[in-house]
């Protein structure tokens, strides 16, 4: 995989993760109460799904283009 493309995939995953955290803070943490406190791990995980998907696609593409090592039987 081209190093520039690889960098762009990883950086977009990091930016999506930061955007998910910022979105969670913007929508829920300002009016935090006990119900949001209990549900916050689930809500934060939902906001991180796009970052995980982009990272998984990058890993899949990197594995597909990696040279396969031939195993030797001695």
Image (tube, helix red, strand yellow):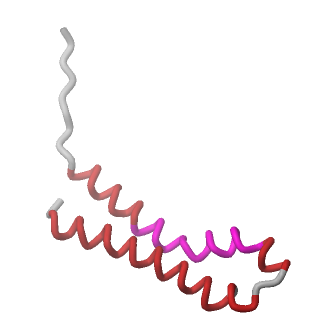
Q: Where is residue 17 in the image (x, y as percent from the top left)?
A: 47, 74
Of 15 and 37, the residue lying toward us: 37
In the displayed structure, would residue 48 be above or below residue 28?
Answer: above
Image point (20%, 38%), residue name: 68
Q: Residue furthest top?
A: 74
Image point (40%, 64%), residue name: 55
For residue 64, side relative to residue 36 (left or right): left
Q: Residue furthest right?
A: 34
Q: Position of residue 74 (x, y in %)?
A: 18, 8
Quadrant where the N terminus lies?
Answer: bottom left
- Asked which quadrant contains residue 40, the reply is bottom right
In the displayed structure, would residue 65 be above or below residue 13?
Answer: above
Q: Where is residue 64 in the image (x, y as percent from the top left)?
A: 27, 51
* Count of marks, rendered view: 0
Image point (23%, 68%), residue name: 7
* Range of residues picked out in magenta: 39-54
For residue 35, side relative to residue 55 (left or right): right
* Predominant SS of the magenta segment: helix
In the displayed structure, would residue 53 be above or below residue 32?
Answer: above
Question: Is residue 43 shown in magenta?
Answer: yes
Of 70 and 17, the residue lying toward us: 17
Image point (69%, 91%), residue name: 30
For residue 18, side relative to residue 26 (left or right): left
Q: Where is residue 15 in the image (x, y as percent from the top left)?
A: 39, 78
- Asked which quadrant contains residue 73, the reply is top left
In the displayed structure, would residue 67 be above or below residue 30?
Answer: above
């Amino acid at each position: 995989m081209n190093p520039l493309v690889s960098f762009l995939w990883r950086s977009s995953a990091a930016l999506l993760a930061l955007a998910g955290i910022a979105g969670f803070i913007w929508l829920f943490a300002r009016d935090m109460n006990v119900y949001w406190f209990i549900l916050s791990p689930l809500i934060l995980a939902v906001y991180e799904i796009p970052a995980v998907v982009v990272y998984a696609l990058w890993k899949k593409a990197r594995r597909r283009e990696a040279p396969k090592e031939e195993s030797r039987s001695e």
